[in-house]
Image (cartoon, grey):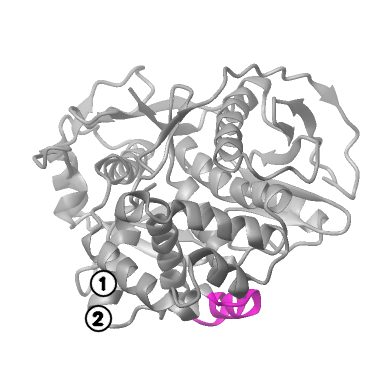
Amino acid sequence: MTPAKPHLNTPSHPNPTPPPSAAKRRISTSPSILLTLLLLLITPSASHAQDLDLQQFRSKSYLIHTNLTRDEVRTFGRHMDTVFDQYQDRFREFHSRTLAQMPLYLLRTEQQYQQFMRSQDINATNTGGMFFFSPKSQGLATWTQGRSRSQTFQVLQHEGFHQFAFNHLGKDLPTWINEGLAQYFEDAIIVGEKMITGLANARRVQQVRHALDSNTAIDFAQLVNFSHERWADTLHSNPDHAALMYAQSWSIVFFLIHGENDRYQTAFSHYLQKVSAGRDHQTAFKEAFGKDSLRPLAKHWTHFANQQQPDPINTAAARMEFLGEALRFMYQRGEPTPKSLPQLRDSLQARHFVLTRKSHGITVEINADDSELYRYKRRNGTSALFKLLEPSRNDLPPRITAAGLHPEPTLVWSRDNDSKLVQDIEYR
């Protein structure tokens, strides 16, 4: 996922693309986390970082190579330790293929991230983060500056699952399941030391439903049998089809975990165990779900996908991220600070404000003319406008909250070591 870019636009037609959600109902508690953060100065080398002057910090589960400060690293280390605990809890029957801590390369800027990836002989253009592996090294890499902390967490959770899967579930997971699970964990949120999963991403829910309604959905049997080569080929040659490929993979994984009162969880786990052990994935699927299971599974998934509703928590958070980027845009231009949500809405719609994001090389535009961006739904079905709160400091924009949701998301602001605005979403 690349940083969001706001711009002014006078569209020739309304943009039908819904806003992306940062969007399992199961909650698990992670063990208490102690970040040791042992600072070890290292000598950068061409094989790892060229002239980036990285230091090493150790959290419980990660060896973090970074040019961030100790305090900045602590936030990301704690978060990723909680995430890693969730991975281990969910996949406790799988055993790590390495006892070492996971390598995490956390750079300050996108330029530094690109420089580091070039040092690994990898072209990371148009990527927002990556799990990479080669004969000489492997690691999880991204950057922090220019996007919200929540967006960086999403990248780390997504790519962090790929890293965990590589080391615990094996190198040959079918791509649809690897990407489906990565998106599933990308959408999770951390509340205290708990990770809440099973949040239905609004953009993906709507995208899959639209494909089913318009008879453009990818055939279920074809998708679960996609080869790595076909997946990569589609990603590079047909971005629109690739976007649906990702969304449907997420939807099928979500269904196999939560569909029909968790009916398929055991079979799904057996399938993962078999492919992790090296079994051909088509044979493993038949053994886990049944010899003639594809057609009935496709039918049940279609019904599930048509009925699935977006989760109000991540839908609200995604809209708050959009409003936060708009506030940042206005604040940095020295414009008067809106005093209320309606005032912010009217200002954005008058100037035809549009936010552009890229995810997996796919561009999504969020248009301020969409009236739903300024509202959220409570769990009882009623809706309300987001509320602007007073800034916590004079040099920060207003905060935004969705009162009445549980957990309740609040968009908050801080400044990094370069005095750049950083937004985050906290849950209470």
Dominant secondary structure (helix, strand or loop) of the stretch shown in magenta: helix
Callout 1, which amino acid? His
Quarter holding residue 354: bottom left
The local crowd at label 1, few if under 14, some if 14 to 19, many if 20 or more residues have their Cα within 10 Å, is: some
Disc assigned to residue 210: 1
* 335, 61: nearer the viewer: 61
**Looking at the rendering, which quadrant does residue 13 occupy?**
bottom left
Q: Which residue is mark 2?
A: 214
Identify the residue at the far left of this view. 382
Q: Residue at x 77, y 56 (%)?
A: 133
Whole-percent x, y for residue 180 in the image: 49, 59
Q: Is residue 236 magenta?
A: yes
Q: Which is more toward the observer, 242 or 380?
A: 380
Residue 353, located in which quarter of the rendered image?
bottom left
Q: Say whether residue 1 is visible.
A: no
- As drawn, is 246 to the left or to the right of 68? left
Q: Quadrant of the C terminus?
A: top left
Q: Residue at x 55, y 49 (%)?
A: 158
Tell me what residue is drawn at x 60 percent, y 80 percent: 230
SS for dot 1: helix
Q: Are marks 1 and 2 in contact (CB under 8 Å)?
A: yes
Which residues are drawn in magenta? Answer: 225-238
In whole angstroms, how far apart are the C-alphas of marks 1 and 2? 6 Å
